[in-house]
Amino acid sequence: MNIESKTLGILPCAGTASRLFHLPKFMLPCKDESQSLLSHWARILVDLGCDKIIIGASTISKVFIDHVVHTQLVEISDMIHVKMVGDTTTMNETVISMLQNETYQIAILGMADTHVLKLSPTLLESIRSDDATTVGAYLWNIRNSQVGKIGQVDISDGTIREILDKDPSCAFRYGWGAIVFKPSFERHLVKDQLHVGYSMLSVLNDHAKVPYEIMHGQYFDCGTMGGYAEYLHYLTTPQVIHIKGTIVIVAVYVNHDARNCELLCKCLTQLRVVFPCEMIVTVDNNSLNNAWHETARALNMELLINNSETHRYEMGAYRLALQHFRADEYVCIQGTMFLHTPIRASLDPHNPDATSFGRLDGLHWSVAGRELIQTLLSSIGLGDYSPEGPLVLWCCFVCNHPFMSDMLRSGMFDLISPTKNHSCAFERALGFYMNLKLGQVKCLDQSIFTKHFLAQESPCI
């Protein structure tokens, strides 16, 4: 007798794996985890409350699936049902076969040849409680390397507006990687269509809403050697990936004072409120108190540890993050900056452009300080420093990718910053550089943030 499932998990695993030398892709091991992609996905579905998980199998894949279930998923094996689907040729045909004779209230479909950190229950519960909605999608901020290789979506007002599949000219910044659906969605599943992305497009063509939830972290398609290699290398080698959209790079140093750490955590928490979907990269610059790491991870922020002796402070933190990430726009900021509202910098989309968080003009420094600035600028051929030039406060700024690319080429990020004096020199060097490249140093509206000052070292010279 078929018992109704309240929340059904669906994992199609009946492909031929022709792109990976006929090795089932779901068997690939997860990085830093003692499990395969398939077992990782099974546990994601369990964490979402699935009371039954169907794994669609072919004659070829079944022996591999059984091996994973009996060696990696023993504790939840009673929830898993391996279902033979025959010689299907499309994902949709596989899903249709998997759902045959199944009774369920709502289903979650994941793809076991991909890797994501987790799925949120928010979308699931939203669709469950909305009688007018039949399907929704989990989205990820995609990388340039994924353009034209996955299904990309255009979003507006809480719903997906358009879906383009594997279009190299597509400019949409989000891609879908898993879906939630009700039984009414099945009428949109056409077996000859390649995958459920086309089925969601059918829902849109019926003028129905397809809600979404944007997930933090990265979406990796491990179905090709290149995609799997990108997953394995992520944050383990200085391999640069380009995020479509904005990344926020946060330079963090905090001392032993518990109150300072508490203030930092409040700033990070508010930063996630202001940037709910964007990638936020926090860089620890030799903090004396690491208690904030837990907060950063809970807020789905990437955490990098800067152990460099020569590239410290803000510019050292940005340099480390830029070894791994590039984006269309950047927010480079100190961890103790409390943002009250979203940052709205009017950046030129086509030419190098940047805006500082604050500036000072004509701020004199000691002779030794001016000599340090001149030494830094001369070493990369930027000319003579004017002591009356502007200062970019706290080395905090917003910029577009052309400006950041120019800064990287100029050698600014190769300049050493081992002391507080160097950090102060960089404030003036940045002002000089922005004046040189842009003709001015623009500033954000000062009302959007509060800068908190934490004592770290003695004042600069």
Image: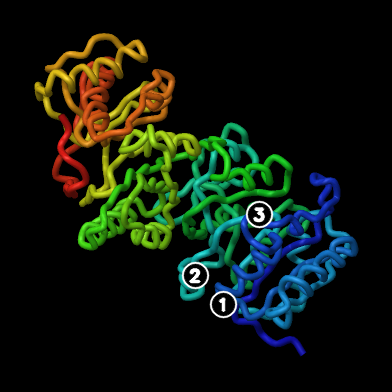
Residue type beneath disc 2: Pro
Q: Which quarter of the image is occupied by the N terminus?
A: bottom right
Q: CA distance from mark 2 to mark 1?
A: 9 Å
Earlier-in-chain disc, 3 versus 1: 1
Q: Which residue occupies 49% across, 40% down?
A: 243
Q: Position of residue 139 (x, y in %)?
A: 52, 54
Earlier-in-chain disc, 2 versus 1: 1
Q: CA distance from mark 3 to mark 2?
A: 19 Å
Q: Counting other residues with Cα less than 10 Å from the Cα at mark 2, is it few (<14), some (14-19), or many (20 or more)?
A: few
Which numbered mark, 3 or 2, is in the foreground of this view? 3
Q: Counting other residues with Cα less than 10 Å from the Cα at mark 3, is it few (<14), some (14-19), or many (20 or more)?
A: many
What residue sits right under mark 3 in the picture? 114
Earlier-in-chain disc, 3 versus 2: 3
Residue type beneath disc 1: Gly
Q: Position of residue 226 (x, y in %)?
A: 69, 40
SS at mark 3 in the image:
strand
Q: Which residue occupies 70% across, 87% down?
A: 3
Q: Are marks 2 and 1 in contact (CB under 8 Å)?
A: yes
In the image, 154 versus 391, the foreground residue is: 391
What residue sits right under mark 1 in the picture? 49
SS at mark 2 in the image:
helix
What residue sits right under mark 2 in the picture? 121
Q: Is residue 266 left or right of residue 151?
A: left
Q: Position of residue 238 (x, y in %)?
A: 54, 36
Q: Is residue 92 left or right of residue 449?
A: right
